Image: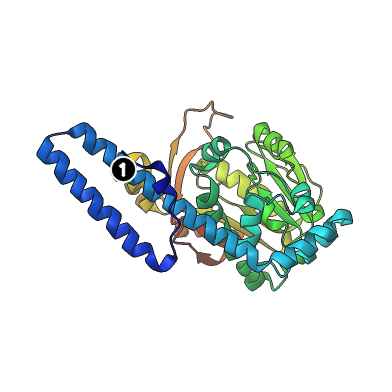
């Protein structure tokens, strides 16, 4: 009889490779035995058993890594937790100055109960289903993609503008449930962080989970924003990867009105290779041809049109098209991250 408690074996990292080899040998033996016995049920049962062992082992290793990262800063976090009993929002970024962004992100993913005051201050995470609905993934995988974007943005902002992000006003255009905004709490006061989204459900979820900042609903095709000010940094992650050609032009014109003269706009676009993966490549030949010919390829989702235009779908944009069509913006440089290859980052300054 299979002993279920074997699944919870704790192994020193040095022995990990040998353990996995042993499991593979055992599984191979049982597979061979079931072939001899012509017992498919037994083979399927053993497959599920060893997959479960491996899954639990990986989860245990992952959990240990996260605990080790937090344990390095245990004393610092205890001190921060005590100070946050009566902290002013403007003082929060300074408290976390010595905490690396990766650790800060994992902390916010699930704040341990021992840091009661930190847990009270920062927003809770939305459900796994909400995360999946917005991005297609959730949890640590989604966090790692977000961390890569924020790191690149922070570095690029300083390089392009010469300014520090902790002294800047920031607008998240298309903030969704606030997955990027919450990481910005490490750098800036919530008083200087703004977010807009055209879907009221997004702002509702932000409020339900305690996302802090100046949040508001925008129009789907905005010719103005609900703020009477300009921003040092505006970013739009995975927004122009979905907009129709007409809508993208209007949004870029609108954002130009709200960027400071020495500010920066960061957007993401998709390369034409995206179409090889979209819908299992069914439209790839057609959409890549449009991308090559026009520079802008768009397939709409099943949504009601606004002023005769379906504004939302899937999009790829070429750099030459961008330069040609949007002279009000100057591309300073282009970046990408291997962890999220279909989000190409354009660092833009007002022309």
- What residue occupies the far top of the structure in this picture? 304
- What residue occupies the far left of the structure in this picture? 36
Determine whether, in the image, residue 299 is placed left or right of residue 247: left
Indicate the position of residue 147 as horizontal and vertical percent values: 58, 59
From the viewer's side, name the closer residue of 251 and 13: 13
Determine whether, in the image, residue 106 is placed left or right of residue 323: right
Q: Which residue is mark 1?
A: 281
Residue at 32% of width from left, 58% of height from top? 20
Indicate the position of residue 346 as horizontal and vertical percent values: 54, 60
Q: Compared to 119, does 161 lie above or below? A: below
Tag 1 secondary structure: helix
- Residue 24 image-quadrant placement: bottom left
Q: Compared to 152, does 196 lie above or below? A: above
Indicate the position of residue 51 as horizontal and vertical percent values: 34, 45
- What residue occupies the far front of the structure in this picture? 1
From the viewer's side, name the closer residue of 298 and 172: 172
* Viewer can see residue 270: no
In this figure, what is the number of numbered marks?
1
Residue at 65% of width from left, 48% of height from top? 173
Indicate the position of residue 233 as horizontal and vertical percent values: 69, 59
For the residue carrying disc 1, how many other residues have a C-alpha within 10 Å: few (<14), some (14-19), or many (20+)? some
């Amino acid at each position: 009889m299979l002993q279920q408690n074997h699944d919870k074996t704790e192994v020193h990292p040095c022995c990990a490779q040998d353990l996995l080899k042993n499991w593979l040998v055992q599984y191979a033996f049982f597979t061979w035995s079931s072939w001899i016995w012509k017992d498919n049920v037994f083979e399927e049962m053993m497959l599920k058993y060893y997959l479960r062992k491996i899954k639990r082992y990986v989860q245990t290793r992952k959990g240990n890594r996260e605990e080790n990262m937090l344990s390095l800063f245990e004393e610092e976090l205890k001190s921060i937790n005590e100070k946050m009993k009566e902290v002013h929002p403007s003082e929060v970024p300074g408290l976390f100055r010595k905490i690396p962004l990766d650790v800060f992100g994992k902390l916010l993913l699930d704040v341990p109960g021992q840091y009661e005051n930190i847990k009270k201050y920062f927003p809770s995470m939305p459900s796994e289903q909400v995360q999946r609905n917005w991005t297609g993934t959730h949890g640590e995988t989604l966090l790692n993609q977000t961390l890569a974007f924020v790191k690149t943005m922070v570095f690029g902002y300083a390089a392009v503008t010469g300014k520090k992000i902790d002294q800047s006003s920031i607008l998240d255009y298309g903030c969704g449930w606030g997955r990027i905004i919450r990481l910005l709490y490490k750098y800036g006061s919530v008083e200087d962080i703004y977010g807009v989204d055209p879907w009221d459900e997004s702002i509702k979820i932000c409020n339900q989970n305690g996302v802090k900042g100046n949040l508001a609903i925008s129009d789907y095709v905005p010719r103005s924003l609900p703020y009477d000010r300009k921003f040092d940094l505006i970013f739009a992650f995975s927004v122009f990867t979905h907009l129709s050609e007409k809508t993208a032009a209007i949004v870029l014109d609108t954002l130009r009105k709200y960027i400071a003269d020495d500010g920066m706009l960061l957007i993401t676009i998709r390369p034409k290779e995206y179409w090889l993966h979209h819908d299992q490549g069914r439209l790839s030949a057609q959409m890549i041809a449009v991308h090559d010919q026009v520079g802008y390829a768009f397939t709409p989702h099943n949504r009601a049109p606004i002023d005769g235009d379906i504004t939302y779908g899937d999009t790829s944009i070429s750099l030459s098209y961008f330069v040609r069509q949007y002279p009000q913006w100057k591309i300073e440089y282009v970046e990408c991250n291997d962890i999220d290859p279909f989000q190409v980052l354009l660092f833009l300054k007002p022309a």
